[in-house]
Image (cartoon, rainbow, N blue to C red):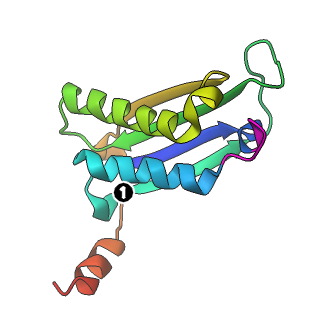
């Protein structure tokens, strides 16, 4: 964990005179989570989901949003959760640049998963260990 979802309005893909590189955005957010030291690599998942049907503020065509939601397991302090939220939104802002950020609603949220009601099976962890000779 965390499981990171980047939601974005579809017009984010064609803003500021050219497309926003969504794959690059995913990589930037994923790398920021790794670099934070708060996310074990073997459980980290980052994905992006475009939203085609949106109404943003006054509905002006230039209005966009990017929302980053990180779902994490229990056991992290409030300070760590806040740090992760800051790291993720900073990664988005750095990636899209100041001009695009000026017309984009940016948000970052960390949600704690209730482990009692979650089932998880992770074969990737064992494969990573095998690939690394361990």
75 left or right, relative to 7 = left
100 relative to 50, above or below: above
58 relative to 111, above or below: above
Query: What is the quadrant of the C terminus in the image?
Result: bottom left
Which residue corresponds to the image point at 59% horizontal and 49% vertical from the top-left? 48
Q: Position of residue 47 (x, y in %)?
A: 53, 53
Q: Position of residue 10 (x, y in %)?
A: 75, 40
Which residue corresponds to the image point at 56% horizontal and 34% vertical from the top-left? 97
Which residue corresponds to the image point at 44% horizontal and 39% vertical from the top-left? 91
Q: Position of residue 74 (x, y in %)?
A: 23, 40
134 left or right, relative to 72 = left
Q: Position of residue 16 (x, y in %)?
A: 74, 35
Which segment did they paint magenta?
14-20
Which residue corresponds to the image point at 22% horizontal and 33% vertical from the top-left? 80
The residue that mark 1 highlights is 44
Q: Among all residues in the image, which is located at the extreme top?
A: 58
Inspect this view and state whether residue 115 appears. Answer: yes
32 relative to 69, above or below: below
27 left or right, relative to 48 = left
Queried whether the magenta region covers residue 19, the answer comes back as yes
């Amino acid at each position: 964990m965390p499981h990171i979802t980047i939601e974005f309005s579809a017009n984010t893909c064609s803003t500021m005179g050219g497309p926003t590189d969504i794959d690059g955005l995913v990589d930037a957010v994923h790398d920021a989570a790794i670099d934070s030291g708060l996310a074990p690599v073997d459980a980290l998942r980052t994905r992006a989901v475009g939203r085609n049907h949106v109404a943003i503020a006054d509905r002006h065509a230039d209005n966009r949003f990017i929302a980053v939601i990180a779902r994490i397991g229990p056991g992290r302090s409030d300070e760590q959760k806040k740090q992760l939220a800051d790291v993720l939104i900073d990664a988005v802002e750095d990636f899209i640049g100041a001009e695009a950020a000026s017309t984009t609603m940016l948000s970052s949220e960390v949600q704690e998963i209730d482990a009692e009601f979650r089932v998880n099976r992770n074969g990737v962890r064992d494969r990573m260990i095998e690939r690394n000779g361990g």
